[in-house]
Image (cartoon, rainbow, N blue to C red):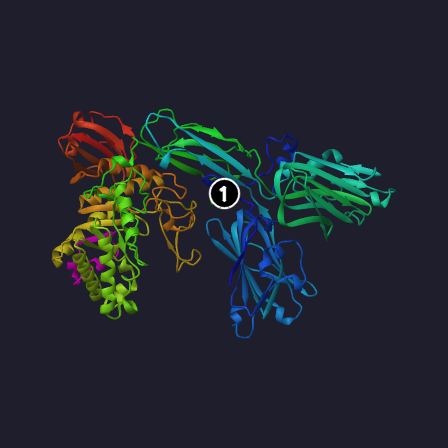
């Protein structure tokens, strides 16, 4: 079975969000590093220390395995172990040859620039032979590049496989597949490259739901916390070299700091920090290196020297790590030689926290030091590389509201909201130069937190309102800015608890919401053999009893959805008894309601009716249709989510026409509708299927944050005007942070709970439209769209231009007998107040509300 090997995390997510990678190449506030900063790049080396996970998965069930529980330590300790200390898998003859492989799946804590991947194996006999190896490099946008590894014999009894990406890749993970003759013993995993840093960004806003009152400027606390991964020698506070005795000769001691931390290991022939111990006692031929740095989780210490003529070498090296309290850890470094480069390296199975590093380097004669590399992670009060991290405020259209504010790391930064704080959406955007990438973002890509400003409301101001036309899926019932309907609760299909069901429903009502329960799974889905045979009476009786008990447990739920998007299932189209079984089930539901003494109403869903119009017809022609009370549509406009003007009227006209033709006239609700915003990488993959296989992939167009505002408003406005009694927006908050998966990005709030502009648009829609009756839709000249909703005391008009255009629309041109004197307020889609002009409102592609007196 696959088993994930845990390791102490180098990265702790702090605050609300963890953001990105910093390729620190020398910090400008360290004057001693100024010269090297101009040319320094990351020191490339073994970066397995920067992995956040390592998963080994055999292709077939092995007959035996060993050391799997020690895999992480054994494969990343820097030592090519013997067979007895390797991670082994045995495949016996019952395992097909094609399944005799092991996948090594590893993910980096931060993006990593990978140059080479190597795996070492012990091969004591032919049955241990490595037959093949591929390495898949998974980029930040999910794109996969697979490379066949080269198999070479390192020495007798050992094999090394090596893979190099087709071009330098910044990756988030690696997948290595190794096939074997029969048995496999992995001894070492090495990834050569550069691991980047991370900036943790804690954003604190004490208000609930990040909603603020107009006219009351607020303060957001932002705490950047730099975590530098990879070569952290640029963080050194001091570096000293002290010989064990007075050497015969030295060279470039005055440039030691620069030369040892500039990223170069191969100065030829004579540029290194030289110590010549000719004529001195052998036991004193050593050099002590001492350095201090901020508290750092040290993963490896590497000292490089260059052997120009056989006289320059290490004969031994010990490394001591000292923490803040003075506790020490001392270990022997491993000595290797590659051509003229000689290296002393200590690789720690587990990082050791240190503020000082002491190394004693012994040499037989001469030492020509060329480079020090210290890998690890630190998060103590660091500065950011140029350009500094900045914050700015912007509106939902992306227009700047303030100048940039530079942020300091390791401290709390007070970020003030704009001074003239009117209602609307305010985005706090963080930006930096190409050296910085926020979490799961590309370098240079920006990150935004949202806040809304509106008249504050409380749950006490919201009362249960069956006439409400607005609903939200997966909402927070304690959010007072939402509409009258909630869609959070699925029917309890396990052991029924009457008290729990009652308390669940009453919690919604106490919050001023009506719950629309969904009946699916369990007894509802008990249709045998995919609806290829009729339901038994016993199955129907169980369903009836279960529903009756729910209805009795709480008498306040009037509407119930039966089934969930069943037209997307194969049984809908292939099950010979689907419609007769549906008829039998809704009839059982009706009997349950009668027994419970409740006039419950049943809703049937048809998903994606715009592209599946035949499914609407099939339902309306079925015997079950007359037993339902409401037809629900889920008009998701996959895959491009075209603007609703292009398809909403056609869809609603079709449904009304089919009802007239079949004689089954039902109210229409939209109990799910929404669109994903473009949470993906710029130009990156966002869809379904295999992103690398054109035959299977299905790209999805995510809307921009601004476009999502217009989409949300238009769905509600056009849906209501064209005959939908209620509209439930899908959904309240993003379901995840996977930027390649559209289903994670439908929320009006982001994954971390901050509002998107769509949230401000939804709350404004609830304030202005909910409770008012649709009273006409006009499509006029100049791409003008104008909808009217009437209320008891006032009317609300919603106008915009589609597909393009911007300009003033005179009150007379709207054909409603309006003038500026009747206008109570004009607000944009997210609630920002607009001036009233006698000549008429300016209409653009962004919806605009005009509230008028009767």
**Could you tell me residue 825's position as x and y percent?**
23, 28
Q: Nearer the viewer, residue 824 or 625?
A: 625
Q: Relative to 523, is 436 on the left or the right?
A: right
Range drawn in magenta: 610-634
Instruction: Determine the residue positioned at 47% across, 43% down.
Output: 441
Q: Is residue 45 visible?
A: no
Q: Secondary structure at mark 1?
A: loop
Q: Is residue 283 above or below residue 544?
A: above
Is 45 left, or right, of 689 in this rendering? Answer: right
As displayed, is residue 60 above or below residue 641?
below
Q: Quadrant of residue 383?
A: top right
Verify whether residue 176 appears in magenta. Answer: no
In the image, residue 787 above or below residue 611: above
Q: Position of residue 189 (x, y in %)?
A: 61, 56
- Residue 394 in sight here: yes
Number of callouts? 1
Outermost bottom residue: 93
Tell me the residue at 25%/49% (across/down). 516
Report which quarter residue 280 is drawn in. Answer: top right
Q: Residues within 10 Å of mark 1 (few under 14, many from 20)?
A: few
Of 833 and 154, the residue lying toward us = 833
Q: Magenta span has 629?
A: yes
Q: In front: 539, or 535?
A: 539
Residue at numbered disc 1: 13
Q: Considering the image in quadrants, where does the C terminus appear?
A: top left
**Residue 114 image position (x, y, % from top left):** 57, 50
């Amino acid at each position: 079975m696959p088993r994930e090997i845990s390791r102490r995390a180098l990265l702790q997510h702090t605050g609300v969000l963890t953001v990105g990678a910093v390729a620190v190449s020398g910090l400008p506030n360290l004057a001693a590093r100024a010269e090297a900063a101009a040319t320094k790049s990351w020191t490339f080396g073994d970066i397995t220390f920067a992995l956040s996970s390592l998963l080994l998965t055999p292709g077939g069930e092995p007959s035996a395995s060993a050391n799997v529980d020690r895999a992480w330590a054994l494969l990343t300790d820097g030592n090519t172990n013997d067979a007895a200390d390797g991670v082994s898998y045995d495949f016996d003859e019952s395992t097909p040859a094609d399944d005799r492989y092991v996948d090594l799946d590893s993910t980096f804590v931060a993006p990593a620039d990978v140059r080479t991947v190597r795996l070492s194996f012990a091969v004591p006999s032919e049955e241990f032979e490595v037959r093949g190896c591929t390495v898949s490099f998974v980029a930040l946008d999910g794109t996969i590049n697979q490379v066949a590894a080269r198999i070479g014999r390192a020495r007798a009894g050992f094999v090394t496989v090596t893979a190099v990406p087709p071009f330098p890749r910044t990756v988030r993970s690696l997948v290595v597949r190794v096939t074997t003759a029969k048995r496999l013993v992995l001894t070492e995993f090495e990834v050569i490259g550069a691991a980047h840093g991370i900036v943790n960004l804690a954003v604190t806003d004490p208000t609930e739901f990040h909603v603020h009152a107009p006219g009351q400027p607020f303060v957001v606390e932002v705490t950047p916390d730099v975590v530098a991964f990879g070569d952290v020698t640029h963080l050194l506070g001091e570096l000293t070299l002290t010989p064990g005795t007075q050497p015969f000769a030295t060279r470039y001691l005055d440039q030691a700091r620069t030369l040892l931390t500039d990223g170069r290991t191969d100065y030829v022939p004579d540029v290194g920090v030289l110590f010549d111990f000719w004529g001195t006692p052998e036991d004193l031929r050593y050099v002590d290196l001492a350095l201090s740095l901020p508290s750092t989780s040290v993963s490896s210490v590497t000292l490089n020297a260059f052997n120009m003529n056989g006289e320059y070498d290490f004969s031994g090296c010990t490394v001591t790590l000292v923490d803040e309290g003075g506790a020490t850890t001392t270990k022997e470094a491993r000595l290797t030689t590659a051509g003229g480069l000689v290296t002393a390296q200590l690789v720690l199975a587990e990082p050791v926290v240190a503020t000082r590093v002491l190394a004693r380097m012994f040499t037989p004669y001469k030492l020509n030091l060329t480079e020090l590399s210290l890998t690890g992670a630190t998060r103590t009060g660091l500065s950011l590389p140029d350009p500094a991290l900045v914050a700015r405020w912007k509106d939902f259209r992306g227009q700047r509201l303030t100048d940039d504010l530079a942020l300091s790391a390791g401290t709390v930064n007070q970020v003030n909201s704009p001074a003239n704080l009117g209602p609307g959406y305010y985005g706090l955007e963080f930006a930096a130069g190409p050296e910085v990438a926020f979490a799961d973002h590309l370098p240079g890509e920006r990150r935004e937190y949202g806040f809304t400003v509106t008249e504050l409301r409380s749950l006490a101001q919201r009362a249960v309102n069956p006439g409400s036309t607005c609903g939200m899926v997966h909402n927070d019932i304690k959010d007072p800015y939402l509409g009258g309907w909630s869609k959070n609760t699925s029917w309890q299909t396990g052991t029924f608890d009457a008290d729990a069901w009652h308390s669940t429903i009453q919690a919604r009502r106490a919050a001023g919401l009506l719950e629309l329960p969904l009946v699916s799974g369990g007894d509802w889905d008990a249709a045998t053999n995919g609806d290829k045979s009729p339901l038994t009476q016993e199955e129907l009786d169980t369903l009836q009893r279960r529903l009756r008990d729910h209805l009795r447990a709480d008498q306040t739920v009037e509407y119930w959805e039966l089934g969930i998007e069943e037209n997307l299932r194969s049984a809908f189209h292939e099950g010979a008894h689907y419609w007769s079984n549906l008829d039998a089930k809704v009839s059982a539901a009706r009997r349950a309601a009668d027994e419970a003494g409740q006039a419950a109403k049943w809703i049937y869903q048809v998903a994606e009716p715009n592209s599946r119009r035949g499914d609407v017809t099939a339902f309306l022609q079925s015997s079950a249709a007359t037993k339902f009370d409401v037809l629900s549509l889920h008009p998701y406009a996959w895959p491009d989510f075209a603007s609703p003007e292009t398809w909403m009227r056609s869809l609603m006209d079709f449904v009304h026409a089919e009802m007239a033709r079949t004689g089954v006239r039902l109210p229409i609700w939209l109990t799910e509708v929404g669109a994903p915003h473009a949470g993906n990488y710029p130009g990156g993959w966002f869809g379904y299927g295999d992103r690398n296989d054109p035959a299977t992939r299905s790209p999805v167009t995510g809307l921009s944050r601004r476009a999502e505002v217009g989409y949300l408003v238009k769905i509600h406005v056009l849906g209501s005007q064209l005959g939908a009694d209620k509209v439930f927006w899908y959904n309240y908050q993003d379901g995840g942070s996977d930027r390649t998966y559209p289903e994670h990005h439908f929320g009006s709030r982001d994954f971390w709970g901050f509002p998107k502009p769509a949230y401000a648009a939804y709350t404004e829609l609830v304030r202005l439209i909910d409770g008012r009756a649709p009273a006409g839709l006009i499509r006029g000249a100049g791409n003008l769209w104008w909808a009217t909703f009437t209320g008891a005391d006032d009317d609300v008009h919603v106008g915009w231009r589609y597909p393009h255009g911007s300009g003033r629309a005179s009150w007379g041109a709207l054909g409603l007998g309006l003038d500026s004197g009747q206008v109570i307020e004009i607000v944009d889609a997210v609630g920002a107040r607009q001036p009233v002009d006698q000549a008429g409102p300016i209409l653009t592609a962004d919806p605009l509300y005009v509230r008028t007196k009767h």
